[in-house]
Image: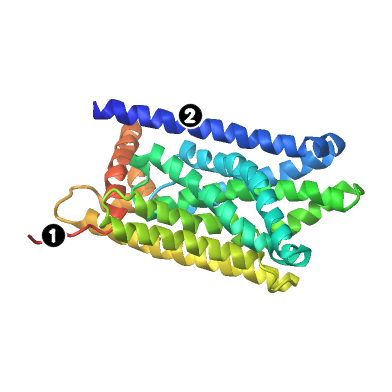
Amino acid sequence: MATLRASAGRRVVGLTWAFLCLAGAALIVYEFSGLIRVFPGSALLAAVLLLLTVLVGVGILEQVRPLRPPPRPWAWSAVLWGGTAATGSAIVANTGLQGVWFKTAGIDFGTRWGAALTAPLNEELLKVSGVLLIALGSRRLVRGPLDGFFLGAFTGLGFQVVENWTFAMNGLVVAGGIDGGAAVGQSFTTRVVLTGVGSHWAMTAVAGTGVGILLAHRSPPAPRRHLAALLCLLTAMAMHWFFDSPFLESVAGIAGKAVLNFLVALGFYLTLRRGVRARARAFLLSPGTDLSPALLTRGSRRRALRGVPPAQREDAAARAVLYLDEVEEHAAVRPVPDRVP
């Protein structure tokens, strides 16, 4: 009975995800269909450049995840949420909230502070809601904070790429529709080369860490989890606020803000990675398991498989996948000590 309920719950989550992604994509098409008709070549060029960006980004994230890459459907569901549901909804939400700032605080204030007071609220909540939705539909895969970090990073990457495309399209209008290739290239240079290292992927990775803490399989008491998740979300919002703030508006200053966001995300990653690897190593070396320490890294697994007779390698690789499920379960979070009665 519990299995049926869980299956029904996953189906509801999947349908909700699909509906909201389609709705977000429809909003983007509705908003930019006119520009696409007028500048089809430039729209295609921007899309190709940013498709390459997302492929490179996904590849990097897959390679730096400890132990093994995440399941690709799981990763790409997050990319699609960020690029459709979150981005499309943000177009509507940002327009409305920025209008509030202009009406209540004046044009000068709205122009200077509108982005910094709008995007951190709307966009971070829209992105992390997708992280939470996907995590609830794949509880088995979200074992702890590191899984939340990567789910958030994939979500932010999808948002980042599609938002960059929308900025490229708007840049065509600002440029007067002249030399669309140059306008797209300038947008790509600014938003990918200059600031891509510390943009949405970094912010949502930090917020996603909180989702991983919240849904960790072996969890500490709820108040601690809730507080930690909230702090992760507020940290992501603060990163976004500073990035969009009117401080340090020179090229060097903007690049510096992106690097700062990257360093914050890197600090989260290295801390989480160190903990996961240490717990995995301790589990594999403990007397309570007969699993091989060769499971710890990709390289050691490849070397171990090379020592298996060719006819048995496929079965050995399949067993290693099952063993890694157990290793990741033990490595995800620090064990919660039993309470003393």
Question: In which quadrant will I find the C terminus?
Answer: bottom left
Give the residue type at disc 1.
Arg
Q: Secondary structure at mark 1?
A: loop
Disc 2 designates what residue? 15
- Depicted 247 relative to depicted 324: above or below: below
User: Of marks 1 and 2, which one's residue comes earlier in the chain?
Assistant: 2
Q: Is residue 215 left or right of residue 259?
A: left
> Gap between marks 1 and 2, in whole Å?
40 Å
Q: Nearer the viewer, residue 108 or 148?
A: 108
Residue at image point 71% right, 64% down:
105
Pointer 1 with pointer 2, Cβ within 8 A: no
Q: Residues within 10 Å of mark 1 (few under 14, many from 20)?
A: few
Q: Position of residue 262 (x, y in %)?
A: 56, 64
- Depicted 259 relative to depicted 88: above or below: below
Q: Nearer the viewer, residue 79 or 125?
A: 125
Q: Position of residue 38 (x, y in %)?
A: 87, 37
- Depicted 89 relative to depicted 260: above or below: above
Disc 1 designates what residue? 339
Color theme of the render: rainbow
